[in-house]
Amino acid sequence: MIGLKRFAVWRWLVVGLLCVLGAVMTGCGNPGNPTEPPRDGQARVFPPVAAPGDPVWLIDAPRAASPQGKVRVGGQTADYTTDPTSGWLRFTVPEKAGGGPQPVEFTGLLSQPGLGLSLTVLPLESASQDTVLYAAASDLADIQKTYRDRLNRLLGDCKGSCPPELTNTIERLSALKLPDFQPLLSGRTPGKQALASPATLRPELNISKFPLPVPQPQPSQFCGQVAGLLPSSGLPTGQVISLLNLLFGGSLGIDPSTYGHPEQAPYQNEPPSTVIKKFLDAPTGNGKGVVIHVLDTASNSADPFVTQGEVNYYNTVYKNRPYHGSIAGQVAQVVSPGAALDYQQVCDKNGDCSTLNTVKALCAVAEEARKGGKHVVNLSAGGSYPALGLLWALREVAAAGVPTAASYGNRDDCAGLVPGDRCNHYPADWSGSFATSADPKAPTMLLSVAGWDVATLQMATYNRGMLSPGVITPPPSVQAPGEFWFNRLPYFGSSFAAPVVSGVLANWMACKPGIPFMPFVNTPGQLPLPLSVVRACP
């Protein structure tokens, strides 16, 4: 049995972690006092980040909950039992659980007031990979000096009190060596830091206080931080993220090392310019003086990506279709022929997109924009996990006056999900939080772009959530044609709708101040983008 004092300490630790993670998107705890300890009986999930197949524990479950039973993660069901060491309820994340934030509920309970439980589900490829660490250079010496000590003290407090699987992760994590940290912006060097003295260390780590919530880096601060890859491959990524957030929540940001993938016509072999002219009513302007930064599979000299396997388009199969980022750039160029293209290869030849490389590329765009010029970011990639570094870097890009067109996500994102599951896709799902004001007609600096079907003249069935009844998805912020032919091969999906919007933005910015409001037009038969925007320039 867990000693009452030891249990209270660990419970407080866990609540601190939940506040740390929750503060990133929603805030946590009592708004007037975020460090207030939990109420007795207040149920919590630990770790709040986990991959399918990983163990998760429920702490302070409702009294009406049985020692064993079932929970729902989104729409998926899992059995739980009582862990004999901690007394917590344990379940395994269902193999088909939807990625990203999913609600957690007990089945069979008539009432679950105030639970509000949530679990952020990692994609399978992130289940046991290295993790990215971000820190302010001024905090680095303290982190390096106290890393192993904090984990060892937590390990001592946890032995005999926590589930063995969690204790094992803490022990193995404490044996890892911190990586070398490098500036997010190349060309900058972190200032020399004096080693922290014992007097400046945090309180004892049998912690009677839980860490403060993660402070949101202001847009001008994040890209000045340093980052490194922690060699945590083989450990449960969700537990690594959660434990490090717990111990360093105020000074360390943690992400999986990958954040997503590139997203994958009746006018067969028509030039893209013909499609654009027909369905955008011949847009005007040429984007001269604007740079479109295409963060994808292509560099300025090559695109090594090949879609492995078969692509089925209107019942015709195309095998091993090459390219992705270079095609997205060409679509943007068709819409905005005078804009300059800057390709940044952040996704490898297999389609895995590096969190750190994407963050660095976004920081470089923000830095360039602060020096002058006009810029647009095209991000035809994404995934279900809400990576902190991606969010913070996009905020810095937006603060520099640079809009981003992000793909909404395709139907494949929701494959295998059932009613009640949430089908998430980031960064597109952050679009609403990037609005320039509270006015519902205010433009957003991050556009979530869905594909519009040039055959049916309405939202295309390849978009996320389409043909998935009961699966929960937010709407996109805008639609655009997303079906084109290059070299007698079809390229379709929200990946290729996003660069249409990037091109429209570039045209606007070449002759107008600010960025335009582009509404979500979802009336069948009506063109998806307003003529007042696409024909705004002479």
Image (cartoon, helix red, strand yellow):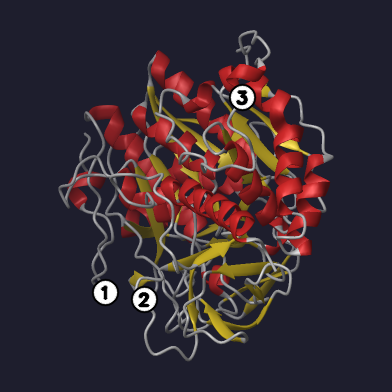
Q: Residue 524 carries which label?
A: 1
Asked if residue 380 shows in the view, the reply is yes
Label 2 environment density (alpha carbons within 10 Å; few <14, some 14–19, many ≥20)? few
Q: Residue 307 carries which label?
A: none
**Residue 514 picture quarter:** top left
Q: What residue type is labelled 2?
A: Thr
Q: In this view, does 447 lie to the left or right of 155?
A: left
Closest to the observer, 517 or 311: 517
Q: Which quarter of the rendering shows the C terminus?
A: top left
What percent of the width, then of the height, locates residue 499? 45, 47
Closest to the observer, 217 or 5: 5
What percent of the width, then of the height, locates residue 297? 65, 44
Q: Which of marks 3 and 2 is in front?
A: 3
Label 1 environment density (alpha carbons within 10 Å; few <14, some 14–19, many ≥20)? few
Going from the N terminus, do you reach mark 3 or mark 1 first? 3
User: Residue at left 58%, top 29%?
Assistant: 202
Q: Name the residue under label 2.
A: 456
**Residue 374 picture quarter:** top left
User: Residue at left 73%, top 58%?
Assistant: 166
C-beta proximity under 8 Å, tags 2 and 1: yes
Mark 2 → mark 1, Cα distance in angstroms: 8 Å
Asked if residue 345 shows in the view, the reply is no
Q: Name the residue under label 3.
A: 201
Q: Which amino acid does label 1 sit on?
A: Pro
Q: Which quarter of the rendering shows the N terminus?
A: bottom right
Q: Which of marks 3 and 1 is in front?
A: 3
Mark 3 → mark 2, Cα distance in angstroms: 63 Å
Going from the N terminus, do you reach mark 2 or mark 1 first? 2
Q: What residue type is labelled 3?
A: Leu
Dot 3 falls on a residue whose secondary structure is loop
**Residue 398 picture quarter:** top left
